[in-house]
Amino acid sequence: MNARGVLVAATAAAALMTGCTSEHPTPSPPPATVVPTAIPAYDGSLRPAQAVQALVPLRARTIRVVDWAEIRRQVGLPELTGRSPAVDRAAFAARSAVDAPLLDPSVVAPDDARLRAAYGFGVDDLAWEAHFLGGGSRGWVLAFGPGVDMAAVSRAVRAGVGRLRGAHVDTRDRLVTQHVAAPGEPVWGGDPVWARLVPGPGEAFVVHRGCLATHPRSSETLQPIAGFAITFGDHVATVRVGRDRGDLFARVRLGRGRFGRVFRYGVADPATGRIGYDVPHPSRAAALVRSGDLPFGTCAPGD
């Protein structure tokens, strides 16, 4: 882990230590949710993990977002595009594969060379990318930066290039989508609790509704959870469960074994419902996310 990562991890841990000296004796309820009464419009001015919620069907269980623009800034190549020199694109691919939490293989990556040669855009032109799954739903959203010719993107989709076959292009919002919510269908964005779990910037995000399978070391001290979110950034991760969590220390203690070697030095703040982790190897953390090995999200007994 580089010196900057150590400093950030230490700062995050210090911030989270506030209010963490004793475990709350009385369990508090999970964060309240509301029945969606309106279908919010997509708002591209929001942060990616918030903006995409207007498109994801409510029946999906998990949203995973990679903010490519933020990762390029962290790697030191903020101006990188599909038209950049090959040596710069290769350097970014090598660095990001190790030092960035790439939660899902990019939809565009397998056909990058063809798309750049024939249509003038590629994986390095993505602003961000989201994948959602669960509840019988699986799809994705690609967001392109202002320098991309969306007419060329439309031609690639019509030509059925790779996984772009059958996708929908929104030239106004600069999006390409697959299996997003139909008009009038309830979406994640109809419940504001999920946007509040991903309030800040980051390199990648996970938002999950509900709990995960019961952990072998789970105990009666665990409370039910409505869901959780993870924000990754600069070799740290912040988990948010909901405010006033009396079971947060118990959830941190579940993170041993393989998880504890990847998500290190967990620090809990029950008042804010946050857990901070040092993540020296983001690629390993991404693999745990994909496998669902996230003990802090375990179901409480009886869930």
Image (cartoon, helix red, strand yellow):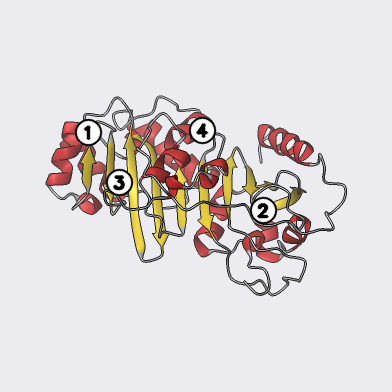
Q: Earlier in the sequence, mark 3 or mark 1?
A: 3
Disc assigned to residue 144: none
Disc assigned to residue 263: 2
* Element class at badge 4: helix
Distance from disc 3 to disc 4, alpha carbons, whole Å, reads 20 Å
Residue 256 at x, y percent in the picture: 72, 63
Distance from disc 3 to disc 1, alpha carbons, whole Å, reads 17 Å
Marks 4 and 2: which is nearer the front?
Answer: 2
Q: Earlier in the sequence, mark 3 or mark 4?
A: 4
- Give, as a three-letter code, the residue at label 2: Phe
Residue 188 at x, y percent in the picture: 43, 50
Q: Earlier in the sequence, mark 1 or mark 2?
A: 1
Q: Earlier in the sequence, mark 4 or mark 2?
A: 4
Distance from disc 4 to disc 1, alpha carbons, whole Å, reads 29 Å
Residue 15 at x, y percent in the picture: 76, 36
Marks 4 and 1: which is nearer the front?
Answer: 1
Task: Give the labeled residue for mark 4.
Answer: 75
Task: Give the labeled residue for mark 3.
Answer: 108
Q: Badge 2: how crowded within 10 Å, few (<14), some, or many (20+)? A: many
* Element class at badge 2: loop
- Give, as a three-letter code, the residue at label 3: Val
Dot 2 and dot 3 residues touching (CB under 8 Å): no
Q: Earlier in the sequence, mark 2 or mark 3?
A: 3
Position of 40 with respect to 281 (left or right) is left
Task: Give the labeled residue for mark 1.
Answer: 171
* Element class at badge 1: loop
Distance from disc 4 to disc 2, alpha carbons, whole Å, reads 21 Å
